[in-house]
């Protein structure tokens, strides 16, 4: 766990992060600081960088800014606790989109624009947002995730079974799946894919997640049995999402195998036609696909450097759809439709529970009550996001949809701090105790615009109740070092939003290890440990029982508040007004159902 896989979770500023659920819970670098994110896959060595301090005024008179964008607050998913609906097209200009989509028809070509090029089309090695986004178009996996609930659903595997001791998983494969060259896809291919992912020489991001898979057997062409060294239910989802590659093309697993001349071969709904030097990728529909054959004849991806370039390309009809990052889409005169969808990332304030002040749960609750969440959503994301009360969104199959964030109550926050001994004894506007000012810096990496904007508002909310909370902007490497060394007070950060609900790495007390553990906040709760360990080894990995345990985990986290859970940002897919069939959710990108896209009249 001392090795940090930095490249698997890009910031939500890169719109292509929404293209696939991140394979592992890894630290999320900013899009602007990709060199640090991609370097070596290890956390930086040496001493932490000194923060670039951005102190506020010496008096707490600053109040959070007001906003006029409040009309739609009651409709926010995180506030209403209703499941996120399928994205519906909203025209940004006339002509209006028909209320009833026309019936699907075959034919047509689509070019999708996005920020950044794919680093590789090898599914075992793809780390960039664009590279991961294209994987499900070319490759299949054993299972899929329901886009909105995260529930596992069949894909290449028609069914699966877990032994009563949760140490053996058996997949039964469908018999009509074929590779792009026409050969049948068999259990031997799946076994080969698992072994390749586990090969340390390949250095795949999937490898560390399969540490509990000790034996893989294919007793026949349609059956696969995986034995585990311990009961570990999350392995089912990890195996389910692994892209399957053909064993009869062993160079498939080599980084050098992906080129314009010899592209990767999969079994997905599209076939690679060309991967150009400029990063463009051209696909054609797989006419022999085992599932629903795509309506579109061809599908292409074209990279752009900036949002402005991407907007101009859509305006000039160089692209038919544009993957826009979070925030306000560009103003366009061309009639387009807008699809709003959640990114697979959630933001929070991490409180250091070993801190002499933040170790008091009354202080953590008070700071949570000081945050105007609706205003935060409006100010930072123009309302393009959803509020969350815990580390799973309300619509997730293992979440507690009744959980609520602490209400915005500055006066109540001051009362809680007063109970903890923090009062303004000298009338200077700052809270103090025994002659010590309540000093809690708010830190984040300054290269990430979204985190910086969230941290700026969080700092202002704390200051408004009398907490001396200067904003500290540091470089990405310093944030990583601060987290692993537990050398921080409060940090604004984000984790990938995964369909698998196990979050043991973040919350188990045994993960509170300086320099290696992911329990950076030193959270230690006996009930959480018990619930998480039971959920890891539920007999037969029974989903109903797991769905009873994880809401209890969320309830404890919401009460103890090792994190102050904030929001999930949304991104936007802008498309020509006659493109239909799009769908997306926090657990499936808008590109994953590209086989269902079609052009209307």
Image (spheres, rainbow, N blue to C red):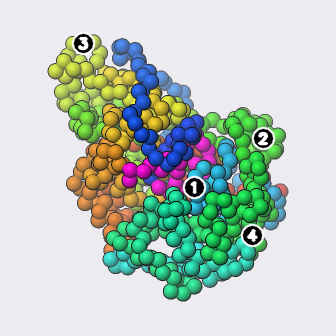
Magenta stretch prevailing secondary structure? loop
Q: Residue furthest left?
A: 434
Magenta run includes residue 577? no
- CB atoms of marks 1 and 2 within 8 Å: no
Image coordinates of residue 570 in percent, x first then y, are 56, 44
446 lies above or below 574? above
> Who's the residue at 22% across and 37% down the image?
360
Mark nearer the viewer, 2 or 3: 2
State the residue in front, 380 or 474: 474
Spatial CA span between label 4 and label 3: 73 Å
Q: Distance of mark 4 from mark 1, alpha carbons? A: 21 Å
Give the residues drawn in magenta, as a range: 1-24
Write down the residue under mark 2. 313
The residue pinned by badge 4 equals 286
Q: Quadrant of the C terminus?
A: bottom right
Mark 4 packing: few (<14 Cα in 10 Å), some, or many (20+)? many
Between disc 1 and disc 2, whose residue precedes?
A: 1
Task: Give the spatial CA distance, label 1 vs label 2.
Answer: 24 Å
Gap between marks 2 and 3 measured at Cα: 58 Å
Q: Is residue 8 magenta?
A: yes
The residue under the point 68% across, 74% down is 179
Picture layout, residue 59 above or below residue 520: above
Q: Earlier in the sequence, mark 3 or mark 1?
A: 1
């Amino acid at each position: 766990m001392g090795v940090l896989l930095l490249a698997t979770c890009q910031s939500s500023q890169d719109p292509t992060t929404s293209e696939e659920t991140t394979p592992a819970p890894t630290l999320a670098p900013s899009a602007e600081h990709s060199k640090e994110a991609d370097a070596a896959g290890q956390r930086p060595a040496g001493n932490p960088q000194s923060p670039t301090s951005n102190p506020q005024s010496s008096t707490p008179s600053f109040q959070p800014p007001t906003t006029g964008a409040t009309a739609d607050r009651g409709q926010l998913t995180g506030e209403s606790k209703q499941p996120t609906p399928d994205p519906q097209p909203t025209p940004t200009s006339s002509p209006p989109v028909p209320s009833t989509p026309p019936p699907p028809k075959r034919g047509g070509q689509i070019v999708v624009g996005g920020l950044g090029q794919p680093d590789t089309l090898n599914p075992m090695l793809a780390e960039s947002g664009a590279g991961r986004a294209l994987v499900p178009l070319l490759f299949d996996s054993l299972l899929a995730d329901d886009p909105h609930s995260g529930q596992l659903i069949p894909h290449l595997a028609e069914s699966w079974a877990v032994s009563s001791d949760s140490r053996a998983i058996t997949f039964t494969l469908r018999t009509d799946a074929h590779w792009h060259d026409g050969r049948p896809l068999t259990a031997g291919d799946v076994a080969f894919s698992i072994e390749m992912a586990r090969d340390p020489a390949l250095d795949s991001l999937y490898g560390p997640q399969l540490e509990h898979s000790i034996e893989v057997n294919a007793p026949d062409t349609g059956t696969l049995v995986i034995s585990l060294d311990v009961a570990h239910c999350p392995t089912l989802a990890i195996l389910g999402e692994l892209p399957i590659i053909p064993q009869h093309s062993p160079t498939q697993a080599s980084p050098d195998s992906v080129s314009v001349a010899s592209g990767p071969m999969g079994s997905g709904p599209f076939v690679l036609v060309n991967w150009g030097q400029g990063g463009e990728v051209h696909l054609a529909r797989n006419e022999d696909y085992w599932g629903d054959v795509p309506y579109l004849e061809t599908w292409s991806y074209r990279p752009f450097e900036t949002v402005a370039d991407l907007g101009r390309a859509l305006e000039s009809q160089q692209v038919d759809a544009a993957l826009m990052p979070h925030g306000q889409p560009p103003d366009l005169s061309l009639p387009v439709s807008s699809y709003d969808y959640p990114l697979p990332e959630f933001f929070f304030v991490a409180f250091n529970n070993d801190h002499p002040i933040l170790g008091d749960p009354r202080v953590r609750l008070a700071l949570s009550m000081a945050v105007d969440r609706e205003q935060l959503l409006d100010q930072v994301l123009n309302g393009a996001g959803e509020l969350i009360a815990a580390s799973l969104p309300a619509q997730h199959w293992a979440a507690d949809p009744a959980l609520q964030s602490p209400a915005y109550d500055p006066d109540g926050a001051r009362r809680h701090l007063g109970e903890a001994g923090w009062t303004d004894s000298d009338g200077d506007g700052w809270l103090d105790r025994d002659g010590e000012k309540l000093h809690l810096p708010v830190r984040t990496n300054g290269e990430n615009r979204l985190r910086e904007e969230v941290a700026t508002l969080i700092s202002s909310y704390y200051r408004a109740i009398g907490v001396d909370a200067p904003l500290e902007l540091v470089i990405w490497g310093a944030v990583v070092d601060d987290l692993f060394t537990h050398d921080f007070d409060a940090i604004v950060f984000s984790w990938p939003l995964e369909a698998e609900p196990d979050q043991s790495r973040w919350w188990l007390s045994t993960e509170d290890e300086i320099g290696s553990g992911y329990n950076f906040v030193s959270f230690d709760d006996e009930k959480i440990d018990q619930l998480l360990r039971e959920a890891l080894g539920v007999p037969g990995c029974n989903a109903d029982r797991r769905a009873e345990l994880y809401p209890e985990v969320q309830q404890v986290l919401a009460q103890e508040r090792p994190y102050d859970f904030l929001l999930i940002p949304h991104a936007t897919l802008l498309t020509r007004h006659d493109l239909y069939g799009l769908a997306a959710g926090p657990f499936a990108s808008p590109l994953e159902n590209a086989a269902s896209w079609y052009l209307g009249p």
